Image (spheres, helix red, strand yellow):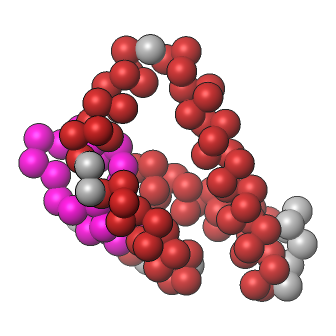
Amino acid sequence: MEALRTALQSEIAELASDHKLWTLHIAVLERHPELLAKAFAGGAAAERHIVAGIAERTGAAETDTYPLLLAAAAGAAFRVALTRWSTLPEPPALADLLDEAFHLLAAGLPAPR
């Protein structure tokens, strides 16, 4: 999970440089839900690549639960971080939000205090 978090951190550097663009992107998707299918298709393709990488690194098959579940959880963590970063009035850094999401997953997603 830590290797995947680190990899995603390096991928978001360019993304994080344009907060206004992503805020607009999220707003357009909210106003035009018919565009969500196209947005999800791109995410699904990326997730398949992540599954392949996890499977190769762990020696598991791409159809095994571990690579599929870890890739899906990482995708969810990324989407949550991006959504919060795009919609909060004064968001923390995207990297910090991604770290927070991964930390919660690594801790077994404990119940809030």
| Residue 82 seen in the current view | yes
Q: Magenta region: which residues?
A: 81-102
Q: In the picture provided, is 40 more to the left or to the right than 104? A: right
Q: Residue at x 46, y 66 (%)?
A: 11
Q: In the picture provided, is 95 more to the left or to the right than 40? A: left
Quarter holding the C terminus is: bottom left
> Within the image, what quadrant is residue 28 found in?
top left
> Is 11 inside the magenta-drawn segment?
no
Q: Residue at x 62, y 26 (%)?
A: 37
User: Taking 60 as reference, is 63 above or below it?
Assistant: above
Q: Residue at x 80, y 75 (%)?
A: 55
- Residue situated in front as seen by the camera: 75 or 10: 10
Q: In the picture provided, is 49 more to the left or to the right than 60? A: left
The image shows residue 45 at horizontal and vertical percentages of 71, 48
User: Taking 34 as reference, is 81 above or below it?
Assistant: below
> Is the stretch drawn in magenta largely helix, strand or loop?
helix
Query: So how many labels did they put on this image?
Result: 0
Q: Residue at x 68, y 65 (%)?
A: 50
| Residue 106 seen in the current view | no
Quarter holding the N terminus is: bottom right
- Residue situated in front as seen by the camera: 22 or 79: 22
User: Taking 91 as reference, is 41 above or below it?
Assistant: above
- Residue situated in front as seen by the camera: 77 or 37: 37
The image shows residue 73 at horizontal and vertical percentages of 57, 60
The image shows residue 42 at horizontal and vertical percentages of 63, 42
> Is 99 inside the magenta-drawn segment?
yes
- Residue situated in front as seen by the camera: 37 or 84: 37
The image shows residue 59 at horizontal and vertical percentages of 85, 85
